Image: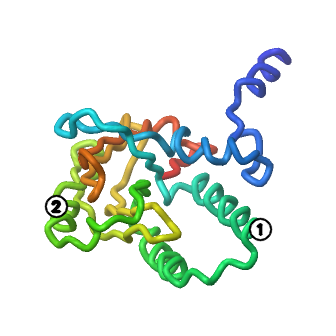
Amino acid sequence: MIWLTILSVLVQAYWQSKAPADWNDLELARFLVDSPWAQMAAPSAKGGSFPPIAVYLATAGPVQKAVAERARRIALRRPNAANDFLREEFEAWFADNSAGHVILAARVGNNEAFTSEPEMRRMKQDSVLDLGRARLKMSGYFPPTSRDPYLYLAFPRAPATVAEKSVGFDLYLPGVPGPFRRADFKIRDMLVDGKLEL
């Protein structure tokens, strides 16, 4: 019995056994691209063969803690950086939208496509959250900035249970070569103390 306990501690991922403040920089960076809430989104069937894009579920509790730790470390390393008013605007937007939405962050960089009306229309039309039989269109977004390379896409938060195997996203990412991407997150992997973190 004691060996089973030791084995379960040994196989626990670092994000289960340590708080984000105790992760090294590599663990923190890796968590935001390879964890139950983060991945490299591959091109979808209509996307062709292009490099994957880093995406993460910004509204998941473990991700919010990791992102806060990343921001703390950046502030320590750049204490004299100018105020980022767009970041403050984003934080207000996130606070207003996170309770009723699932927000997905996609690392696309700040590019000219976000000034194109046709590209914005295409993103709104083709970005969808799949959950069971529900296909929910994007309801809002916050574009990347010169300081934050992530595009944040908000989708209505539908009731999700462990009965659903996964939550998926079909994405159209403006300014990205082969802009169609697909990301699927396994629901059973996103349970923390029996609660789904989405």
Say which of 13 and 149 sits in front: 149
Say which of 124 and 150 sits in front: 150
Say whether residue 39 is left or right of residue 195: left
Q: Secondary structure at mark 1?
A: helix
Amino acid tagged 1 = Leu
How far across and how far down the image is residue 39, in percent? 46, 40
In the picture of the structure, the residue carrying the numbered disc 1 is 76
Say whether residue 58 is left or right of residue 178: right
How far across and how far down the image is residue 94, in percent? 47, 72
Q: Are marks 2 and 1 in contact (CB under 8 Å)?
A: no
Check disc 1: other Cα within 10 Å, few if <14, some if 14-19, many if 20+. few
Q: Quadrant of residue 50?
A: top left
In the picture of the structure, the residue carrying the numbered disc 2 is 122
Q: Quadrant of residue 103?
A: bottom left
Numbered circle sitting on residue 137: none
The N terminus, quarter of image: top right
Which residue is at a point 76% across and 45% down the rendered structure image?
Answer: 24
With respect to residue 5, does 107 lie above or below?
A: below
Spatial separation of the CA atoms under disc 2 and disc 1? 39 Å
With respect to residue 113, does 35 lie above or below?
A: above
Which residue is at a point 28% across and 69% down the rendered structure image?
Answer: 114
Say which of 177 and 152 sits in front: 177
Q: Residue pushed farthest right?
A: 2
With respect to residue 154, does 17 lie above or below?
A: above
**Mark nearer the N terminus (2 vs 1):** 1
Amino acid tagged 2 = Arg
Check disc 2: other Cα within 10 Å, few if <14, some if 14-19, many if 20+. some
